[in-house]
Image (cartoon, coloured by chain):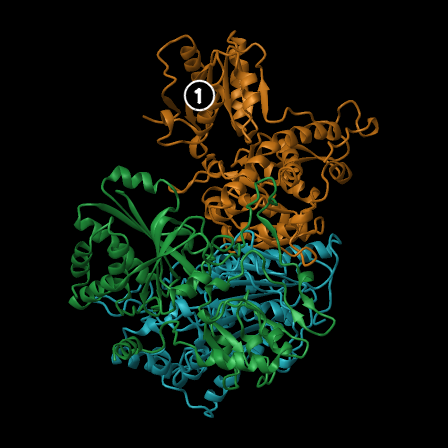
Amino acid sequence: MTPPKAATAETLDGGAPVGGTEELISGSEAVAHAVRLADVDVLTAYPIRPYDTVMQYVSKLIADGEFDCEFIVAESEHSQFEIVKHASTVGARVFVGSSGVGWLYAFEALAVTAGLRVPMVAMVGNRALDDPGAFGVEHNDALAVRDLGWMLCWVATAQEALDTALIAYRVAEDPRVSLPCALSCDGAFLTHSQSIVNVPDQATVDSFLPPYDRKEKLLHPDNPITIAPQANEDWVMEIRKQSDAGMRRARDVITEAYDDFGAKFGREDEPFIERYMMEDAEIALVGMGTLAMPVKVAVRKMREQGQKVGFVRVRWFRPFPVEELQDALGGVAAVGVIDRDYGLGSAFYGGVLAGDLRTALYPLEDRPKVVSFIAGLGGREINTDNVITIAGMVSDAAEGGTTDDQDTYWIGVRE
Amino acid sequence: MSETTVEGFGEFVETQVLDAWKGPKKVPHEEFFTSGHRTCQGCESAQLMKLMAKAAGPRTIILGATGCMYVANTTYYSTPWAVPWMHTQLGSAGSAATGTAAGLKALMRKGKMKDEPINVISFCGDGGGADMGLSAISAALQHTEYNHLILMYDNESYANTDIQVSGSSPYGAHTTFSAPGKVQRIMNRRWKKNTAAMLAAGHPDCKYVATVCTSNPVDAMNHVRKALSIGGPTFIHSLDPCPKGWDYDPRYSHELGELAIETGIWPLYEVVEGELKMHGKSRRILRGQLKRKPVEEYLMRQGRFAHFVQEDIDYFQGKIDQMWEEWLIPGVIPFSAGEES
Amino acid sequence: MSTGSVEVIYRGIYQKTLAKNICRGVVFAARKEGKIGIAFGRYSDSPERNGIPAKQFAVVADEQEELEEYLSRYEPDNNDVTIACDDTLCKGVESWAWYGLQPINKLLGENGTLLVTSTQSPNKLINFIHRKASPYDLALVRSEASFSGLWVYKDDHTDVRLLGALAKVAPHMFSIDSMLAAIKEQFKDDLKVTSAKKSYDDTEAQPVSTEQGNEEVPYSFELPGWKEMEEGIVIRGMDMSKGGTGKDGSYVPVRNEVFKKFSTRTMRPVINFETCTKCTLCWLNCPDTCFDVTADGLYDANMEACCGCGVCEAVCPVKECVTMVNEEAFDDNDSQWAMWTKDKDGYGKWLAEKIANQPARSHGFHHIGQYEEDIANDSA
């Protein structure tokens, strides 16, 4: 596959968004529009807060005749994911999603979807796992599949959700990759709050997103293949290695997709990570999802006080952007990772992102200290004061103070 | 074509028209499930797969849930299937059928794939169907806009994993989870789940539910053909004698199937758009033209009942007598009319 | 030699308990001499399938470290003794989870012993067994193959007779006294001890040279690497164009080249084409799709695909039209129909001879009390 051509001058006007309409919509509604624009063929729903708002919007689009697809309300998340897995193998573009324990109810289907290299796109409305039953955001649901062959990305705004959903289809279905992709949207903060979003026009989307073509992997009477025969130890390593190769190739495919997206839609984003005030930063904060907003506000406040603090938001957690993070963070003295998840019993009892980030920075000769923070669990607010406290501790660690980079700090928990 | 094509979401699509074959000599030679499977000698489920694929023909997609007919049939690099086949998870026979049929329907409606009726068959064992996959099958039978057949091959245990008791195992059968011991002779006290009738009664919009046994291969194939032609989701429950788990010489596979019918353990019936019809020897039993054989003749032929004493045989016989003499619909619906009704 | 290993090759399910008893017996006997050991089945053979060849192993050693050294490979090779619990396994072993046909003696070490239960002459068996690059011994326990099902074990002493013979051919692993003591302790049955001792006394091995045996090279396959394999766990289905209807109206279904299944067979159907009424039932009821439809409308069991279940014989409505005959009576997989069309009289004689000389074989359980009857008949 050759890289897509850049947009021509006619389609772009000084970087302004081309075509489309401006809408005041939530992150879930933005994803619903992406699903419509991607001309998804089969879609399955099952109720669980907060992701299911996307399905509420989609079903209305179908009822109103604005979108043509098979819409199946399954009897469980397991069936929900299995149905689209099979629809995908006969050539249908599919969309699905879940939250919290619903995502885990489908866990078997999630594992096989990745193993089968089915390029499904799923939305995770991140939610705390039961028990206790809580509706608020935590990232442990999506992170549970982090080693199984799912590409995982986190978005921070409704616009980014829409854009990334389109990018996700293009990357997932690229024959060099052929892996499923989960688009994580923080519950409530993103799924339920409305902002102004440019909803692109169909022609631009069509120029960016080619039709889904399974080619020689299509399950059809004209191509009588056997998919997923039982395999013993003579074969499993080779099959896993193929998935590994697909995940490695995804890096370049993601980069290509962002380049082309920028050219066609006029919204230029760095793939993999977002850097905020990192040029001269002495310490950095790192996190994923909607915590970006309070962190950026706090960073600005601290900058006003003369503190050289920056922020890196990780967009793609799988494949993990090692090179970009080494580049962004290699020069700072200390990094504070704010995990909206927990890694009970992991190294230093730290968060999941902190663990992977430490691994990524370890080969650097002059590596920064990495301090792990757990915050915002179960949808609890991460406010600017929390962020300023965290930054203070990171500075302290950088200066060799009492903040321990071999411990993990829970921020905003009542003693 | 049995249905008029109507464009749009939620509408029915056409099926292939597969007429019944009148006798074994009318059965075509083509095989779509052929050699290369690693099933036991005399495997009736493998035989069912062969018949099912033959009955459906070349324009068919087959999905197979985890079980013997997945593990023994396909081992990576080797497959007996000449039609497209894909594995699905143990509890996913219903979902695989729905997803495959929905994908084809969407693509054909939207002009992304050549429009033609393609058979979709999803099979599962009794573990996958009567136990784990029951809710997904139930859901699949409600989505009447998708054409497919769910075929449950019932060898009365989790036969692939080492013969463990399932909800479809007979009372008292020796399995690796219900081995008779020094104190407990009968470890499985559950009576076999009445899967086909439950699904027929619970899904009145499902046009076709049937029971079959491969001891009559042409009859079994014609039921498959009928199920694929009638439109919408359909369900067939096949009793497959299992030489390994039931413990008998594999040459007697067909004989055991016939005995199951003749003793009344396995009634053959179909429910076509709400109308129940018994067929074969079961109909003759119902009409009093054929006397049920004592169940002892069936039980004593199988090592899985070798620990039975007279008391167990009597209990078994009593339950079968009840099926035929006291049930609202003999052999099918297990209620009796209450006083108020 | 301080480490000793025994490979037991048997018919899946039918001889599962038998193989387990043998492997456990090896460890118990070695234990009587203060050695340690381990008994295990080849995991890839599980779940076993009726009749499909499977393996179990027993390894004994003086010290734990020696044992571990031996076990640090997946499947013990260079075995001191390979036991074939059924002589038809001598034609080769195609296990359900691997590819190709393994000679029965493949994992036998140099100068090791192949121990087989058989009523055949040693020379006849040697003709079946593939040639080996190193010499070995062949020893026989005079017995028909002992088959039983999953739940009811036919205790006809085959297990202890093999164990007694094992003590004779592998005295470095344990003495006969240790073996008899272990059998006594395990089975608490003096008759089984007697059977083992008698077998020990009767067993004699004969050398087999590198010049003896079946010269045919068994089929095998190269496993492709991950870059050659299709992605998405996809493999090509059976190619219908490789089979199908011939110009003469015959039909030969496409047959799998990777797994053939004939090494599962202990009996094969022989067909009387003269009495066949073309009723189709053998063809229609064969779970292994093994019948070719001939141009003249007859059904020819393909011996590469037939696994010998016997269903065709059971469903055939004509007496002795299909007869299951012990696999020992054949040394090729050729088409019976081709033989018949070439020389009908010759075929008639051949058929009569095969049917007349069929030794009794059973595939396990038929009715409650059958095994007791069998054993009583054997001892009578």
At horizontal 28% and vertical 48% (from top left) the residue drawn is C38
In percent of width and height, residue C257 lies at 58, 57
At horizontal 36% and vertical 21% (from top left) the residue drawn is A407
Q: Colour of chain B?
A: cyan
Q: Indicate left or right for A222 with C174 as reference.
A: right
Q: Indicate left or right for A197 with A376 as reference.
A: right
Mark yes or no: residue A126 visible. yes
Q: Colour of chain A?
A: orange
Q: Nearer the viewer, residue B255 or C157?
A: C157
Q: Secondary structure at mark 1?
A: helix
In percent of width and height, residue C52 lies at 44, 62
In percent of width and height, residue C4 lies at 29, 47
Q: How many marks?
A: 1
The C terminus of chain C - image quarter:
bottom left
Which quadrant would residue B161 be assigned to in this image? bottom left
Q: Nearer the viewer, residue C268 or B203?
A: C268
- The amino acid sitting under disc 1 is Asn
The N terminus of chain C - image quarter:
top left
Q: Colour of chain C?
A: green
Q: Nearer the viewer, residue A276 or A92?
A: A92
